[in-house]
């Protein structure tokens, strides 16, 4: 597809997300795709980033309290604090115990406590009240992710008529799954207050359209514009990506660093298999350890010859299901090492901490196999980062779950069904055995895609669609 001509939007861009990535003095890196992509857009044309400060206060500070503002470069950062109760009900509650599990097909883990929903609506209304006075008539609003679905609707009720776009970073579930959400209709109705709703993949966009047609009797035209609840809503697919060029450079640079030398020394002549994920049940960490165990049983020649490095920083530890997973992973890795380790070899190195972007890039480049096995994932940027970090002359192999949005783009990967442990182990075995020519071929098709579709392309595609 030809790259659309992009002129910097003349209108001011206002980005809204749960957290605001405030620039911190003397510190770069460690930021996700959203932060990188959004910051570049705001610096280009000037704009505002609005969201939660990350701070909780004990008591309601009471209205009218304005958002805290500060400027850096061409960007205004506007932030609100939440009360402890808001944080519990909106963030830990509805966002992370109702929507997140449901949208990742974990009905068994979803909790639809009505207090959570009330908190979600309350915080979205609070955000809208604090944002509305800061808006100008011709602003372009870009609202991100499942925490803030009702925000446009709240703003519209207050009379805001600006162009508003939404982007969903996580999957949109199939109709039958979404129907389990008690307020599914109201949630979708509030999405229809946007002018553009963007998804990571065509599958998710179609699932959304399918719901609107079958449940709401909405009509949809060939361009994906819906008519529902008396509004016209455009839909589109915008796969998020990474800063491919700068990551490739970081990886090359890191390869010469002292730490990466240490890693290589410690692995010696063995093959390194790497996994990097937030400690989240959607990421398929347990099935990954089980598939690795299967690899060691089914192909015993790998014993003493491969090492798995699993980096899994704790995440959402106030949500009980995440604490539970932490215990299960500790047990699974402990069991595996207990069963297979030798006095001079440990099969899995399991680390609960974060690393700088540069270090991660160096780790990825050192690993012969990148293992990305989510049971459901909107996109999965780790898969893209792994590919971008490879040495083009001696690239590693990506083993990727078909249930990650990234599988739609990264067709040079070995695509697996992570529920099928034996097939995943076979793919790992195949990845370890691929010859250089095939590794290069697979790498080339993927890196070409990541170079033409990087984070800038994602942002430009979305914003030009929104402004159109
Ligand atoms: P996440 O679920 O957080 O994002 P992912 O896309 O993999 O998942 O992004 C994680 C990011 O965190 C990556 O950039 C990765 O490098 C970084 N990271 C992970 N572990 C780290 C560690 N130990 N140290 C440092 N950094 C680490 C959600 C959706 C995804 C979607 C993204 C972006 O769930 O499907 O791809 O948003 O839209």
Image: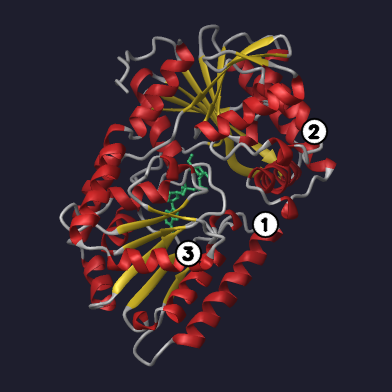
Between 37 and 170, which is closer to the camera in this rendering? 170
Binning the other alpha carbons within 10 Å of mark 3 as few (below 14), some (14 to 19) or many (20 upward) gives some
Residue 435: give its label.
Answer: none
Between 265 and 130, which is closer to the camera in this rendering? 265
Q: As displayed, is residue 7 above or below residue 335?
A: above
Q: Quadrant of residue 426?
A: bottom left
* Residue 276 left/right relative to 87: left
Figure label count: 3
From the top left corner, tell me how far across and down residue 341 is, in percent: 43, 87
Q: Which residue is mark 1?
A: 318
| Chain-order first, disc 2 or disc 1 | 2
Binning the other alpha carbons within 10 Å of mark 1 as few (below 14), some (14 to 19) or many (20 upward) gives few
Between 251 and 47, which is closer to the camera in this rendering? 251
Q: Which residue is mark 2?
A: 183
What secondary structure is marked by label 1? loop
Residue 423: give its label.
Answer: 3
From the top left corner, tell me how far across and down residue 120 is, in percent: 73, 36
Work out which quarter of the rendered image holds the N terminus and state it: top left
From the top left corner, tell me how far across and down residue 178 is, in percent: 72, 38
| Chain-order first, disc 2 or disc 3 | 2
| Chain-order first, disc 1 or disc 3 | 1
Work out which quarter of the rendered image holds the C terminus and state it: top left
Q: Quadrant of residue 179?
A: top right
Distance from the alpha carbon under mark 2 to that under mark 3: 38 Å
Binning the other alpha carbons within 10 Å of mark 2 as few (below 14), some (14 to 19) or many (20 upward) gives some
Mark 1 or 3, which is nearer the eye? Answer: 3
């Amino acid at each position: 597809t030809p790259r659309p001509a992009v002129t910097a939007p003349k209108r001011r861009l206002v980005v809204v997300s749960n957290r605001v990535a405030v620039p911190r003095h003397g510190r770069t890196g460690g930021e996700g795709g959203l932060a990188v992509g959004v910051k570049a857009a705001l610096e280009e044309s000037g704009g505002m980033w609005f969201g939660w400060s990350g701070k909780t206060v004990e008591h309601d500070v009471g209205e009218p309290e304005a958002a805290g503002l500060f400027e850096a470069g061409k960007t205004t950062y506007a932030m609100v604090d939440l009360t402890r109760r808001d944080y519990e009900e909106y963030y830990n509650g509805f966002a992370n115990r109702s929507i997140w599990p449901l949208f990742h097909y974990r009905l068994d883990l979803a909790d639809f406590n009505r207090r959570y929903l009330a908190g979600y609506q309350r915080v979205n209304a609070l955000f809208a009240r604090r944002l509305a006075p800061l808006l100008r008539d011709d602003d372009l609003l870009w609202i991100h992710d499942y925490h803030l679905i009702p925000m446009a609707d709240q703003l519209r009720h207050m009379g805001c008529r600006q162009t508003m776009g939404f982007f969903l970073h996580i999957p949109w579930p199939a109709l039958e799954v979404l129907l389990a959400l008690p307020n599914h209709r109201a949630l979708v109705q509030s999405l229809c207050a946007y002018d553009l709703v963007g998804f990571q993949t065509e599958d998710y966009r179609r699932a959304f359209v399918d719901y609107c047609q079958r449940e709401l009797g909405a009509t949809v035209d060939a361009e994906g514009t819906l008519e529902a609840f008396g509004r016209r809503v455009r839909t589109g697919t915008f796969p998020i990506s990474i800063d491919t060029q700068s990551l490739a450079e970081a990886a090359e640079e890191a390869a010469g660093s002292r730490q990466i030398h240490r890693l290589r020394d410690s692995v010696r002549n063995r093959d390194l298999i790497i996994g990097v994920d937030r400690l989240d049940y959607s990421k398929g960490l347990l099935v990954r350890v089980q598939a690795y165990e299967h690899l060691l049983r089914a192909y015993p020649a790998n014993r003493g010859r491969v090492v798995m490095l699993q980096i899994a920083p704790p995440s959402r530890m106030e949500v009980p299901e995440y604490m539970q997973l932490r215990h299960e992973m500790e047990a699974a890795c402990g069991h595996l090492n207990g069963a297979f380790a030798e006095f001079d070899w440990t099969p899995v190195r399991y680390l609960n901490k974060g690393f700088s972007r540069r270090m991660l890039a160096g780790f990825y480049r050192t690993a012969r196999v990148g293992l990305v096995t989510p049971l459901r994932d909107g996109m999965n940027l780790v898969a893209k980062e792994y590919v971008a970090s490879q040495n083009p002359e001696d690239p590693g192999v990506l083993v990727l779950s078909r249930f990650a949005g990234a599988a739609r783009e990264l067709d040079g990967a070995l695509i697996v069904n992570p529920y099928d442990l034996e097939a995943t182990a076979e793919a790992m075995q195949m990845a370890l055995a691929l010859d250089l020519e095939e590794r290069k071929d697979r790498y080339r098709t993927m890196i070409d895609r990541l170079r033409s579709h990087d984070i800038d392309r994602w942002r430009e595609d979305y914003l030009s669609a929104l402004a159109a």
